[in-house]
Amino acid sequence: MLHNSLKIFGSYAHLMGRTFSRPDRWKEFFKCYIDEIYKLGVNSIPIVIIISLFIGAVIAIQMQLNIVSPLLPKYTVGVATREIILLEFSSTMLALILSGKVGSNIASEIGAMRVTEQIDALEIMGINSANYIILPKIAGMVTFMPVLVIFSMATGILGGYAIAVLTGIISISILTYGIQAFFNEFYIWYALFKSLFFAYIISSIASFYGYTVKGGSLQVGKASTNAVVVSSVMILLVDVIITQIMMG
């Protein structure tokens, strides 16, 4: 198992070495880069907003129902809701969700190109297929991921406000005070910094599994599944490491 893992890692490192080379045609690279930003990033905004709204509402409800100690002020609900959204949900949990949506999309798209021999055709024409196909995806995902995180932060907190307005489970003024109390700007930068690593993990691992597919359409589906599983595990591992370094 260890030998197989090292072999896969070596193949991944070799592919990334080919990917991060100077593009032969910058104009074509930027065209693909803009397309990938739209396809991987902009198209993910609706699902990010919907999930963040509901998660923000659920967090606010759970905090209000479970923080019952008379020693804790009522505005603790707002503080806890804000911290959960900023520190973990809008970066780590969002990355896990996107690894399923974006990661599987990348793996299946590149895998389909492999099994239909489009990648072989590019190589025959003397084009660095790894650089041509994968680099715009990684660059686009890394560029737009912080934007998705900011959308998630804003809509998550808005979800908490929405549940306060619609149900009256907590006073809006108390919730507002709690969200503003003891605010630490560093938490936002911390989440954005983590998101860059998560974006690279999602896009590069999905690209690797799609690029190295062998066989037919059945293997493409298996590669998509493997990409989601491996990228999810790596996101959690990197989250632990970064948190220990930056917050420890």
Image (cartoon, grey):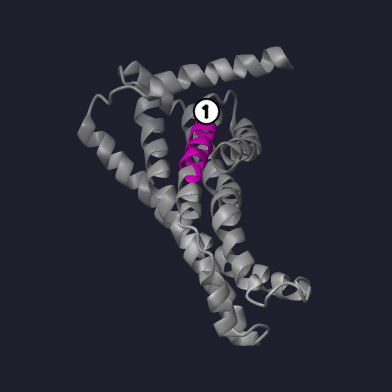
x%, y% of residue 166?
61, 86
Q: Is residue 185 above or below residue 24?
A: below
- Tell me the quarter of the picture where residue 230 sits: top right
Query: Mark 1 packing: few (<14 Cα in 10 Å), some, or many (20+)?
Result: many
Q: Is residue 161 above or below residue 87?
A: below
Which residue is rendered at x = 66% and y = 67% of the image? Answer: 59
Q: Main secondary structure of the magenta part?
A: helix
Magenta region: 194-208
Which residue is rendered at x = 52% and y = 28% of the image? Answer: 208
In which quadrant is the C terminus drawn?
Answer: top right
Which residue is rendered at x = 65% and y = 71% of the image? Answer: 76
Regarding residue 57, the answer to whether it shows in the image is: no
Regarding residue 219, the answer to whether it shows in the image is: yes
Write down the residue under mark 1.
Answer: 208
The amino acid at mark 1 is: Phe
Labels in figure, total = 1
Residue 198: in magenta span: yes
x%, y% of residue 146?
43, 50
